[in-house]
Image: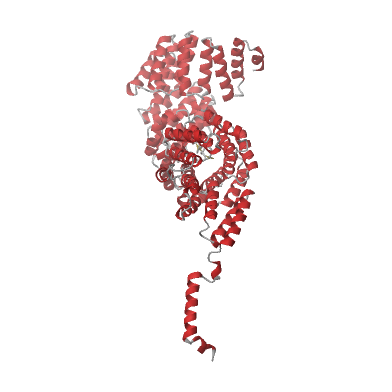
Amino acid sequence: MTMRSFFDTPLVSAAMTLLIVVILVFGARPLHAVNNTEISDQYFEKAQEFVENGDVESAIIELKNALQSDPDHVSARLLLGEIYVRVKNGPSAEKELTKVQERGLDPERYIVPLARAYLLRGKFHEVLDNISDQGFSAPVKADIMLAHGQAHLGLGNTESAAKLIRQAAELRPDNTLIRVGLARVLVAQQELEAAEKEIDLDLSFDPQSVEALTVKGELRRLNRDMDAALKLFSQALDISDDSFAALLGRSAVLIDLDRNDEAKVDLRKALASFPKHPLANYLMALADARQKNFTEAKDRLIAQGGLLDAHLPSNFLLGALHFVAGEYEQAEERLNTFQSAIPEHLAATKLMAATKMRKNQPQKAIEVLEPALDKGAADVQFLSLLGSAYMQVGEYAKGTEYFQRAVEVAPEESAVRTQLALGHIAKGEPGKAIEDLESVMELDPSASQAGILLTLTHLRNKDFDAAFSAAEKLRSAAPENPLFLNLMGAATLGLKNYDEARTLFEKALEVDADYFPADMNLGQIDRFEGKFDAAKVRFNSILDRDPNNLSALNALAQLALSQGENEEAIEWLERAGNAHPNAVPPRIRLVNLFIRLRRADRALAVARELDSIAHDDPKAVDALGRAQAASGQASSAVGSFRRLVSLVPNSAEVHHRLAVVLVATGDFAKAEES
């Protein structure tokens, strides 16, 4: 019989048909390997050994091998899900633990890691709706209560979170994760000291707790104690070198310290295990951006697809990177997402306004900036950007006002600082948005902003020839702008060429009759020439048109002082303060005047108000210290001047003021040192 005829026989043909069916159903492997529990157990045992030795990556490989041999090996799948929870891989953890649930394992064994997987994915409602704490042993019940508390925390319900986690702590008072959870609630409630006490208590129970060391490191980072944070994260990694949270925490600190190459070492290690981990990719992009590798940073974030859509810092960073690339529509889209969640974030406000300016929408930039004026009142970039926007819509008086305020706020910066601060980005915690990425960029498409600030700074430094030269260049580019004539006049006024200055200011008013700064300067010329009544009429005419004009109010106060009219000067300065609740200069002048008039109580009241408005402004802190000293509160003055020393450590005058009040307290050794 030929081979062909053999295969054509009915018996063989039927047998071949059966063989084909078997191959289609079971594949080419032998039938006895379809559900090989023995081999799967061997892989599982190896995985357990790797876990005990801290080799998580190898454990994952062995567990996957076990499940390939036996997809129903529930213990292997459970351990794989638990490992994914440990390394913060939420999607993979949820996938494996859901399969465990479907296979009917005792819920006591999988319910807690499943809850933690939901938390990692931000599925807070699923934790509260689908995972009950009823019918479980006390330890498991406590862990579920912790998960419920963390879900409430994720939804912003801090009171409910605190209540549940405290109840969990009563069931398991020595449980590290519960105490760490309580500390995180306290952090959310801005009770950082209480949170750190909770973690310290936890560490007293277990000094080797990686979770507690990691949270304490994060607390130190939030307190800007970077050296301590770095030490704590490193200590956690010495105990467990694959701790994902500690790797991310240490990399975030290193980025804060501008040690980006070192940060990338940690991040590469984290990404080697989980290449798609959203937070690790965000931090790597941030490190690239800090090194001005903008394209690489942007590409990395975009490659994450929708994984980072809900991560606010990523949206902010990507908005900044699109801005740098000139992709303004995309920048606007990302910034809108960020601002809808954190509308008060000043860096995002500035970046959004700069984006509007780049799109030639100065009026929209003004609409973005004006509501944030209280927060931006002491920010040179904010003020100069607002000034530039007003210039572009033709409101030159307002534009000039904001540029002048920018120079008053930071004269040492304003000549060259036309850059936009892009912000300290919190590691996954949108409410703490702390400023960390800086990218040098022009805020004003017309490129006049730097020239205006430069001219104003020259004027402030009394370098009038340089100021005139800079202003003249600006005017040649835009002769219709009254600001530049006004700046030329101010430089000429500084050189005491009153007649020429008056001519320039009058020309500015010919261009724009409502350009108040030129009117103000004409009033100053009247004052210099002893024409006090004429100056007063001119300043009052400005108030007739603009009742809260800060410059006119200050000028009238100054005019009253020059004539010895102290009470009138006080009235003008108080009116200026009432009209401008966040204005610093009129309040400082009031403090100075009250101290000179020996009205220490009133000086102190204004100084305290000033401190609440501009707590970190050296001029405000100095005013408070002088008012405290004038009121006989030497100890309080010591505290204020010490704060001032921390703000301006290289000022001999500040150290001298501290020494004077230290003498008043009898601390001669410290006074001599100061």
For the residue pair 451 and 47, the one nearer the viewer reads as 47
Q: Tell me residue 371's x, y (percent).
A: 38, 32
The correct choice, above or below, for 534 with respect to 67 in the image is above
Residue 185 seen anywhere in this rendered image of the structure: yes
Which sits in the foreground, 183 or 342? 183
Front one among 425 and 437? 425
Residue at the location (51% across, 89% down)? 5
* Residue drawn where x is 44% and y is 13% of the image: 530
Q: Where the N terminus falls, by quadrant?
A: bottom right
- Residue 466 is left or right of residue 485, and the answer is right
Picture layout, residue 247 above or below residue 654: below
Residue 207 point in image, percent of width and height: 62, 35
> Which residue is painted at 49% across and 48% down in the image?
110
Residue that protrudes farthest toward the left in the picture? 544
Locate the C terminus and report the quarter of the image it occupies: top right
Name the residue rendered at 50%, 70% in the picture. 26
Q: Position of residue 388 (x, y in %)?
A: 43, 35
Q: Tell me where residue 316 appears, x and y as whole percent.
A: 47, 42
Residue 393 visible in the displayed image: no
Q: How is the image coloured?
A: secondary structure
Q: Is residue 623 above or below residue 233?
A: above
Please name whichever residue, 32 or 163, is drawn nearer the observer in this view of the structure. 32
The furthest residue to the top = 598
Looking at the image, how many numbered discs can be counted on the residues?
A: 0
